[in-house]
Image (cartoon, rainbow, N blue to C red):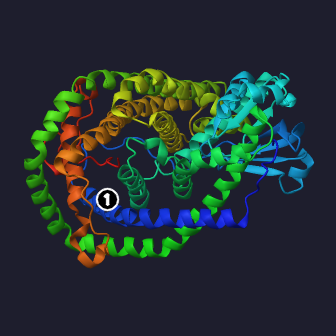
Amino acid sequence: MGAQPSCPLGKRRRQQLQGQVDGMLRNFLPCYRRQLAAAVLRHISQELGPQEPAGCQLSHTKKLPRVREHQGPLTLLRGHPPQWQPTFCVLRGDGRLEWFSHKEEYESGGRPLGSAALTGYTLLTSQPEYLRLLDDLCPSSSADLAQEEPLLVLEEPVSFALFLVHPFRAHLCFFARSRGAQRAWRLGLQGAIRLRATVLQRSRAPAACAFLDAVLLYRRRRGYAGGDDATLGSDAEVLSAELMRELLPALRAQTLRGLRGAGRARARACAEFLDAVHAAVLARASSGLRAFQPEKDALLAALERMVRTDLEQILQQRALGARRLEAEIQGAVEACLCRKVDLHLPQLTLALLSPVEATLQAVRTLLIRGMDRLCHYLRKNPSGTRLRREVYEFGEIPWDPELMQACYREAERNHSHLAQLAKPFGFLGMQSLVFGAQDLAQQLTAAAVTTFLQLADQCLTAALDCSQAAEQLEKVKALVLKKLTSDSETARCRFTRERLLGIFWPFVWSRLGTSCNLEAPEADGDILAVGWQVLTTEGVYRDVVQGLLLQRIDRVPWIWGHSRCEPPCGAGKSSFVAEPSSLRV
């Protein structure tokens, strides 16, 4: 898609990239090993320790998050020179997009012309906006403009456009046949982008939590803070993107010097070259993580045995260390919070709560409409086939992008204002925050749908006529809405608390780093050989600072004041033991 770069990715460059990936893994894996130890300890101590007072009322679905598969004709810009060519596209349930020369090739099981995992892509539906992006990627001088051959195929207006752009992947340019087709593809593609981005954030497994913590620790030690958006994607995709961001300025400058022509054609050719670089980096990172997998599995198993055996002693040791360290740094933390955090905390809390509450209300409205629809059809004495179809469609609500769009749109509301408020704290996680709110909406919807269907199955019997069955469904509806209210308030409190911590915590830690020497390097030796190294000085420092910050967050009345949920066990206590179950920042 676009002109080829004059210098293809050769053997020497591949070897250089492989060496750079190997070097990154050598620096990253020690961080990962230490975070695995901390994550296992946290997981087991929460599993066996006091539970939060309000548990989940709704039944969780066993269905894995997925994208509803979508397919249809799209016109794709491809070839050299690029031309608009008709294709048949398929959006897979795992968030991959494939394109074929025609529908029959897809139906006969033929290989696609191309495919792309949509991690990290941004979808644009405006052709002028895409052209401005190309101009920004590769600004042209007046001399360039005089000799530039315009990329006419992109200059000609197209209707119902879909441009998938990425910082270091090839751009995918499509257009649909109608506005309705464009909308259906837009909703499907946006869902696929979110699904692939949040694969690690959705997991509560110790290995996933440890990986996210390790990435943020690795970034902090390299001078980057507040980068929640840097953890979007799978483990290999996250590490590949981290290295690509480091290499990007030099790669782009070097590549553009070697490309003929100017302007938009060069920008697209540069994107194709970066795509080849990214593919090589991703392949090497995937290989390195696969090679580490046996060691990781053995380490997790050994850590679990050790921690379960010595948990009481470890927790006592942790509490003693936390009290000592808290006494040392509480004054510095308090001063930082008074000077920097207190002024902005109420505003940020309200700006965060507003879209979250609107999102949860949209979920409630959507579910009421769906449950009322089922009751309505049941009263009309429908055929068994019709009723089964209605039940199936109700069960598909969480995965229907058109129905869920109202909820997702509320999650995006006000995000520009929130980003502006969070800017003084160096927060770089707005995309992660919006995706998290949208995932929360989908999870609650799926849990409510599952609960409704389970309860309906229990109370509806063949002995009931349609009117009696409808009355039973109304009772089920009332019970599900009561459970939804409870779970929504708990989720709102937890989500707000986590995200405020994510905004303020890296900033506070960086301010304390120099004065308290919090970033002192530690030995990377074998964790199991030293046993107690599931507790590190740096780790306990981090937990103490987060605990003190959470006490400040919990004072904000809007988080707890107008809901029935309560702060997690230990909130408000000046101790590391107050660490919440959701701490993964």
Residue 14 picture location, percent across and down: 67, 64
User: Which quadrant would residue 296 be assigned to in this image?
Assistant: bottom left
Q: Which residue appears farthest toward the bottom when viewing the image?
A: 529
* 363 relative to 218 in the view: left or right: right
Q: Quick check: 527 above or below 435?
A: below
Residue 192 picture location, percent across and down: 63, 42
Q: Residue at the spot x=35%, y=39% of the render? A: 502
| SS assignment at label 1 | helix
| Amino acid type, label 1 | His
Nearest the eye: 393 or 152: 152
- Can residue 235 be seen here? The reply is yes
Provide the residue designation for mark 1: 43
Q: Residue at the spot x=38%, y=58% of the render? A: 210
User: Which quadrant would residue 467 be assigned to in this image?
Assistant: top right
Q: Residue at the spot x=53%, y=27% of the render? A: 407
Nearest the eye: 450 or 348: 348
- The quarter of the rendered structure image containing the N terminus is top right
Residue 493 picture location, percent across and down: 32, 33
Residue 451 picture location, percent across and down: 48, 41
Q: Quick check: 417 above or below 110?
A: above
Q: Badge 1: few (under 14), some or many (20 or more) residues near its Cα, within 10 Å?
A: some
Q: Which residue appears farthest toward the front when viewing the image?
A: 143
Q: Quick check: 507 above or below 423?
A: below
